[in-house]
Amino acid sequence: SPICLAATVEFESVHVGTKYGGDFGNVPGQVVLTEDGIDMSVEQFFFQQFTGFFQAEVVGPSNDHQFAIDNISVLFDLTNVGFNVTSLTLEYLELGGNDNFAVNGGSILQLAELTDIPANVAPGVTALVDGGLITLTGKIDSVLIGGQELTVDTIVAVPEPTSLVLLAVGGVSALRRSRQHRAGQPRRP
């Protein structure tokens, strides 16, 4: 079987119409979804003097769920994926209003548009925003995104090249041990 080289959130495991937020029994900081080792919590949204915690909802056709954000933020915690994340992509569709964005627990940026994310978004982390796709490069432990009229889709976290080599070597070694065992050969420690 192929070695998984990424951790992904696609919202496919959640029914369309599922809502999160204050009116649905959630509190800021509560983990509401875990996919591929990525924990997603709902968080407060900030715009000037306004603090919101309204709602986020899984929307879309049955084969392509998205996450519609309305005056709320979500935090993707990447510390439990099993590897050091050094690249992350996040698909989004901006429909209006303002946005929040933060990386690795840094200050929450209040932005008119996600294209305003600075290139050096956090210490050691760069951002490129292009055509509805945010690409982060560097050591990434968490990403917060929020908005007033914002939809997020597939989030993909990729390990550093060293982790890829270790995963591949581990997978090859495990496959070699498995084949030797099935062939009746003694296993080497």
Image (cartoon, grey):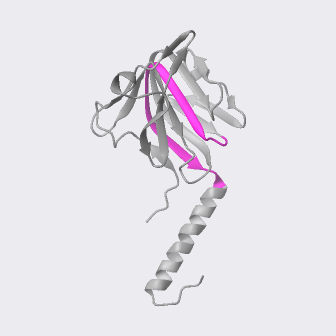
Residue at horizontal 57 percent and vertical 68 percent from the top: 170
In terms of image quadrants, where is residue 148? top left
The magenta stretch is 138-161
Q: Residue at x 51, y 20 (%)?
A: 45
Identify which residue, 76 or 159, lies in the foreground. 76
Count of all numbered marks drawn on residues in the image: 0
Q: Quadrant of the C terminus?
A: bottom right
Q: Nearer the viewer, residue 54 or 92?
A: 54
Whole-percent x and y of residue 163? 63, 57
Relative side of 188 to 41, left or right:
right
Q: Position of residue 42 (x, y in %)?
A: 46, 30
Magenta segment, prevailing SS (helix, strand or loop)? strand
Residue, far top: 49
Please determine whether, in this image, residue 112 is positioned above or below residue 83.
above
Residue at the spot 48% in from the left edge and 78% down from the top edge: 178
Q: Furthest-right residue in view?
A: 123
- Residue 52 in the image, given as x and y percentages of width and height: 47, 17
Residue at 54% across / 40% down in the picture?
Answer: 77
Quadrant occupied by the N terminus? bottom left
State yes or no: residue 157 in magenta.
yes
Asked if 109 appears above or below 88 in the picture, the reply is above
